[in-house]
Image: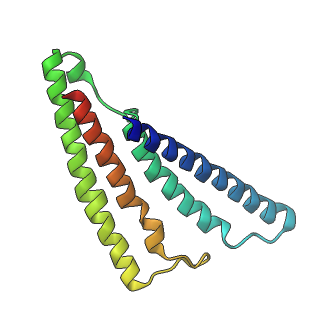
Amino acid sequence: MVLREKIDNVLSKALIIIMSVMVVNVLWQVFTRFVVGTPSSFTDELARYLMIWLGVLGAAYVSGRNMHVAIDVIPSRSSGKIQRRLHLLVYGLIILFAFAAMVVGGIRLVYITFLLGQHSPALQIPLAFVYMVIPLSGLLIIYYKVSDIKKTL
């Protein structure tokens, strides 16, 4: 549990930093557009990439805190043993999805964009770096759900 708390702490601070940079970035965009009269060229793209990182890493964080949206009509009306089995089933399905779609699919996406040498138009950063958040978040979700399974058993 100590490792999980450390990961939660690092992830929450990273999300705070990403959100703060995004707010400053958008404020700079508004300032340069309406006050200076010449909009900054990179702020739109940076805000988009920060939003991707915030959303995907935020999903991993919320999954780890078990705060995600859930329909719990069946578990709430079931006995303790059935509730436990349903939780284990859901955790298993989440692990399967995170592995197949986010880790495997994300690594393929990163690899393909790296091979093609794609760069962002304004910032000129490799798009593989932007997409790296997908497999990273998938691994975090898998870690959280395996930890939840161990706690449930």
> In the displayed structure, does residue 76 sit left or right of residue 56?
left
Rendered image quadrant of residue 69: top left
Residue 11: image x %, image y %?
49, 46
- Which residue corresponds to the image point at 83% horizontal and 68% vertical from the top-left? 37
Residue 66: image x %, image y %?
37, 33
Image quarter where the N terminus lies is top left
Residue 8: image x %, image y %?
46, 41
Say above or below: 93 vs 35. above
- Which residue corresponds to the image point at 40% horizontal and 79% vertical from the top-left? 114
Viewer-nearest residue: 8 or 82: 8
Chosen colour scheme: rainbow
- Which residue corresponds to the image point at 22% horizontal and 58% vertical from the top-left? 100
> In the displayed structure, does residue 65 sit left or right of residue 80?
right
Say above or below: 135 vs 142. below
Image quarter where the C terminus lies is top left
Residue 68: image x %, image y %?
38, 36
- Which residue corresponds to the image point at 78% horizontal and 65% vertical from the top-left? 33
Number of numbered discs on residues: 0
The extreme bottom residue here reads: 116
The extreme right residue here reads: 35
Say above or below: 134 vs 147. below
Viewer-nearest residue: 72 or 81: 81
